[in-house]
Amino acid sequence: MAVMHGTVSVPVSRCRSCLSAGRRIAALVVMAIAAGLLVHVSSPAEAQTEPAVSIPRDVLSAAVACRAEPSAPTVDRPEPVLVVSRPNAITSPDLITALVKAGHTVCALRIPSAHASADDAAQYVVNAIEAMAGVYGGRISVVGYDEGATVALGTLHTWPSAAALVRTIVSIAPRFALPLPLAPDPNPITAWYAKFSASELPAGPNYVAVLNNNDARNLAGQVPVPGVSRGHLRDMTILAVQDPCPLDPPERRVLDSVLGDPPQLPAEPVFSLAYDPVAQHLTIAALEGTPTAYPAGCPAADS
């Protein structure tokens, strides 16, 4: 495991030379996770209702890499953030950069394809939540996107003790099963999450969803349009990128972000709302407790 500074991945063994004495907490997060020192001990009550973690802790921890801005005073930083992408996907570097610039220490979780089932993926999430909360001695926040958001929400249903460790969970374009009773859901992660759809969201976190209102997979599924929350998601604050930028398609912004300037093909097929700078702004505002603080202008206005 490594701590990432900018675009450089720094081995844990060298990270003490990268940070000054007062700014080593991000390094300690990674070292403690990598050393397997933070193993959650369930109470007897939890043990009866929560499943055991069957994947070795060192395997789970190897999927986590953390990044912080060394020049930011540690004591003034917002709570650390765990970013969860869909299994075996490269975590959006734009999203991580935006969160780090906002002052957060960010730990990115990349779930390997060998453990891409939803049940296995949830073990990676709960391990990272418990370890990060243990290092910081308090609550953390979670940002998930696409199927990663779905897994993160399902993890809190599976381990309510982990939900108590999360201050805010922001779901960017979460994937849910479409209401098609005559057709099986081809997405195993959304099919897995369907078993939680009759349950209330676990108590503890503030729940926020950042959506593209044009995404039929969200609007036809369990996540409603803003202001019309229903069912077990009624305690979730719903935001849409069209609210601050109604005339600028988020697809254009995502393509601009992914392709870069000058345009060049990405290393892997990428099309996620997590690359939208407006979605990133709304995510950071939600983490700061001001989810309706929209950007002053849209990227299109400056182009």
Image: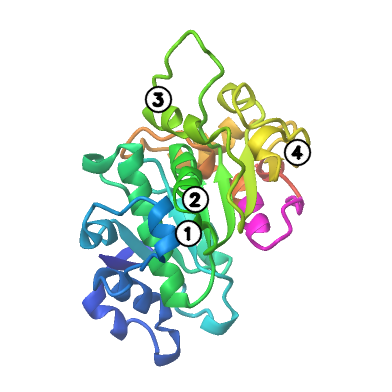
Disc with the residue nearer the chain's start (2 vs 1): 2
Percent across and percent down for residue 78 are 59, 71
- SS label for mark 2: helix
User: Disc 1 residue type?
Assistant: Ala
Tell me whether the residue at label 2 lies in contact with that at label 3, contact meaning CB atoms closer than 8 angstroms: no
Disc with the residue nearer the chain's start (3 vs 4): 3
Residue 20 shows up from this direction: yes
Gap between marks 3 and 4 measured at Cα? 29 Å
User: Disc 3 residue type?
Assistant: Asn
Determine the residue positioned at 35% across, 79% down: 28
Quarter of the picture containing the N terminus is bottom left
Q: Is residue 256 left or right of residue 284?
A: left
On residue 162, the disc is 1
Gap between marks 4 and 2 measured at Cα? 28 Å
Q: Which residue is mark 3?
A: 187
Gap between marks 2 and 1 measured at Cα? 6 Å
